[in-house]
């Protein structure tokens, strides 16, 4: 049944589930294609956070003397940069995904959600590579991950939800306003400094620390440090606030995307 | 006409059978803004927001466009028809009549503005072959990717993989990235995937316009067999020969509405009559001319002229003029035109690449001319497809871009040649004479002399 669509409409997650194989293939394509015809290939996944870590350690850690919760500064910042890189890449890729798939959108029907979703998910491979590097660094500094690592998948899911939520907003807006393309690098840069990556959130006292966690990545990053580097106490309040914020962003993104979806084929 | 069409005549249908596609009062409105309105920027948005903040914000959230200079265009209007299971229905009409929009609405790519359509069964739409092919991936990988995009399950693709490869004839290059494929190979592979879909209802748009003649024939054959399996097909084409061969019924669209529907032969005849009545360049090309700032290379006009600047005449010198617009200068432009008869069969092709014409550096707006010393077309009306491309990646391909008339030149040297004697569209210079006795022997000796048309003895 095909009717004119008005109003906000549901999420139609069932339809998304029906198209899970397409999601799989598009994710697989993005992974496969990402480093084709590059010399360093998948090493890029590690190089970016690694050199950011080196620069941060040098300037913030050594020269500016930014505190690092008593941990070696390199491992302190790298533990944050790994989830951050996943988030920032996912955000970047998904924002441009719809415009990049314009031809597909104009010629074939499928739930459009698949496109930004697959571009965020394809970052998981990069994340795993960088994560291995992080484990190496932890070993090198004679630290050992705590049992709390079982929480990592949850934290990763939070980062994914945030990246997807913002990505849904931006990709849908990008279809109509191509300015978004120029906004995204700027946005991620600002967001980087608003997230406790180069500095610890312990610089803030309560209740500000909890308020700070409205930035979902603050909770994710502090959660990673806690789970991997054995910081005490657990930033459970921060993570909770971050989780709520992430769900809020994701849901609003979903609805906005669904709302705009029907015009994509005509406008993109 | 195929005999199976008799079994699906409306009169003899069982009352309990529901239509596969039912369309009622379907309408699709496009708002055509100026270029500025289409690529909105935040600056426009900001200035408008400052003047009337709430109205602005609401219109953005609701998905309205920010531009104010808009024109409404009903691509489809009050469209009503039915297609029964197992039927093959052709959709014909001029460029811009709404054929592709109809398929887009039925395949749910874009929602209608009014009315509704009901579809029973799994639908797949072929608006283009090779949608979603990725140039960096190999042939094998693209089969899977493209199959998934077209809605096949992974197990299904596995099952049909060998068949697809065999059909595409690219076995040796399966592990080669498709960016190294020739365009023919690319199209063959793409069509092979699409041809192995098994939906209940197939919506097909002009996909046969690609590839060489042999491959087109293969595609038509495949479509033929698909329709024999009892599948419902809605087939859009400018190729009347293909429509007549495949379809039991046809729908003629004009300006978004049904202007004729029924037996293929009747509708095709009606369509051909409507073309005869219209003249010169079709609406579609004319509209393009209006664009002040083209975003891509477009053909904007076509004229066929005789030697004196009047209409083209049989057996006289003629000139085809093609004008175009592009966003910038063009490098190494190639221009081609295909002259077709009203049934869509190509009669001949003129291509600047064949004559190695030099269009090395061309201005963003211009006209090129193709001169023919002796026009072999008999009087009548003809179609032309236009194709333009350059080395900077600009391409333009307009199927059935324009029609033109050829008049009797009176200078062919033929006493009488019109349709009364000629089956076909062209004349070639020729003479008849009586053979000298003994030169070629009697008629009975032709076989042994090897003078028959098929000397291989078939």
Image: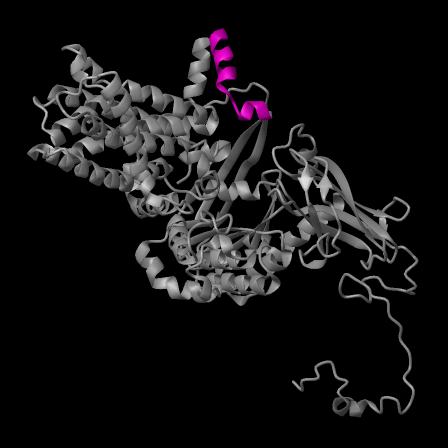
Specify whether B380 is left or right of A93: right
Residue B454 x %, y %: 70, 81
Frontmost residue, B356 versus A20? B356
Task: Report the residue at 50% width, 22% height from top.
Answer: B65
Where's the N terminus of chain A, which quadrant?
A: top left
Q: Is residue B395 found inside the magenta-colored segment of the image?
A: no
Residue, x 32% and y 55% (percent of image)?
B154
- Image height check: is B235 above or below A214? below
Would you say B6 lies left or right of B425 here? left
Q: How is the image coloured?
A: one colour
Residue drawn at x 75%, y 51% is B357
Q: Is residue B43 magenta?
A: yes
Rendered view: A188 above or below A137:
above
Query: Residue A31 occupies which quadrant of the picture?
Result: top left
Pick whichever, B335 or B360, lies toward us: B360
Q: Is residue B111 visible?
A: no
Between A27 and B451, the residue placed more toward the observer is A27
Q: Residue visible at 37% across and 38% down? A: A115
Q: Nearer the viewer, residue A223 or B27?
A: A223
Magenta stretch: helix, strand or loop mostly: helix
Specify the farthest residue to the front: A63
């Amino acid at each position: 049944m095909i009717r004119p669509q008005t109003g906000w409409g549901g999420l139609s997650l069932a339809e998304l589930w029906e198209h899970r194989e397409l999601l799989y293939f598009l994710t697989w394509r993005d992974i496969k294609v990402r480093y084709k015809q590059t010399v360093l290939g998948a090493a890029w996944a590690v190089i970016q956070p690694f050199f950011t870590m080196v620069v941060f350690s040098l300037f913030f850690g050594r020269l500016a003397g930014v505190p690092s919760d008593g941990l070696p500064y390199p491992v302190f910042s790298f533990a944050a940069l790994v989830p951050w890189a996943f988030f920032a890449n996912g955000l970047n890729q998904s924002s441009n995904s719809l415009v990049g798939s314009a031809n597909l959108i104009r010629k074939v029907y499928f739930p459009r959600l698949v496109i930004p979703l697959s571009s965020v998910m394809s970052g998981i491979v990069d994340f795993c590579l960088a994560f291995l590097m992080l484990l190496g660094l932890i070993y090198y500094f004679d630290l050992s991950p705590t049992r709390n690592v079982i929480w990592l998948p949850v934290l990763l899911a939070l980062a994914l939800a945030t990246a997807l939520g913002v990505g849904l907003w931006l990709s849908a807006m990008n279809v109509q306003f191509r300015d978004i393309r120029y906004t995204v690098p700027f946005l991620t840069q600002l967001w980087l400094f608003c997230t406790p990556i180069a500095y610890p959130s312990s610089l803030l006292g309560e209740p500000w620390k909890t308020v700070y966690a409205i930035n979902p990545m603050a909770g994710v990053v502090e959660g990673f440090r806690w789970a991997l580097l054995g910081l005490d106490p657990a930033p459970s309040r921060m993570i909770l606030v971050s989780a709520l914020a992430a769900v809020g962003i994701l849901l609003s993104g979903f609805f906005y995307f669904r709302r705009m979806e029907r015009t994509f084929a005509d406008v993109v | 006409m195929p005999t199976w069409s008799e079994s699906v005549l409306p009169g003899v249908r069982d009352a309990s059978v529901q239509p596969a596609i039912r369309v009622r009062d379907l309408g699709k409105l496009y708002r055509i803004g100026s270029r500025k309105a289409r690529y909105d920027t935040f600056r426009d948005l900001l200035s408008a927001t400052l003047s009337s903040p709430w109205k602005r914000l609401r219109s953005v959230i609701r998905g309205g466009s920010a531009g104010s200079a808009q024109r409404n265009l009903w691509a489809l209007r009050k469209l009503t028809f039915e297609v029964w299971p197992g039927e093959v229905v052709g959709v014909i009409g001029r460029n811009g009549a709404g054929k592709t929009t109809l398929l887009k609405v039925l395949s749910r790519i874009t929602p209608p503005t009014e009315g509704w359509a009901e579809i029973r069964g799994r639908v797949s739409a072929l608006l283009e072959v090779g949608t979603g092919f990725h140039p960096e991936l190999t042939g094998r990988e693209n089969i899977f990717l493209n199959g998934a995009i077209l809605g096949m399950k992974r197990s299904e693709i596995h099952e049909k993989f060998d068949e697809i490869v065999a059909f595409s004839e690219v076995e040796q290059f399966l592990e080669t990235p498709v960016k190294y494929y020739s365009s023919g190979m690319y199209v063959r592979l793409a069509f092979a995937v699409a041809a192995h879909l098994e939906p209940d209802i197939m919506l097909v748009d002009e996909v046969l316009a690609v590839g060489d003649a042999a491959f087109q024939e293969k595609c038509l054959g495949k479509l033929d067999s698909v329709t024999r399996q009892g599948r419902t097909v809605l087939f859009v084409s400018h190729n009347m020969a293909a429509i007549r061969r495949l379809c039991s019924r046809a729908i003629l669209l004009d300006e978004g509405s049904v202007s004729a529907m029924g037996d293929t032969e009747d509708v095709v005849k009606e369509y051909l009559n409507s073309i005869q009545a219209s003249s010169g360049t079709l609406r579609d090309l004319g509209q393009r001319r209006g664009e002040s700032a083209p975003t891509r290379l477009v053909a904007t006009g076509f004229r066929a002229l005789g030697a004196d600047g009047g209409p083209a005449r049989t057996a006289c010198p003629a000139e085809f003029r093609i004008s175009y617009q592009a966003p910038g200068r063009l490098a190494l432009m190639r221009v081609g035109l295909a002259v077709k008869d009203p049934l869509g069969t190509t009669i001949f092709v003129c291509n600047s690449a064949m004559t190695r014409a030099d269009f090395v550096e061309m201005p963003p707006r211009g006209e090129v001319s193709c001169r023919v010393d002796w026009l072999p077309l008999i009087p009548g009306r003809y179609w032309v497809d236009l194709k333009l491309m350059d080395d900077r990646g600009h391409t333009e391909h307009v199927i059935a871009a324009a029609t033109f008339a050829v008049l009797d030149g009176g200078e062919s040297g033929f006493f009488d040649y019109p349709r009364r004697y000629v089956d076909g569209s062209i004349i070639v210079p020729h003479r008849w004479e009586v053979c000298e006795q003994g030169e070629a022997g009697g008629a009975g000796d032709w076989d042994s002399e090897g003078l028959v048309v098929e000397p291989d003895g078939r």
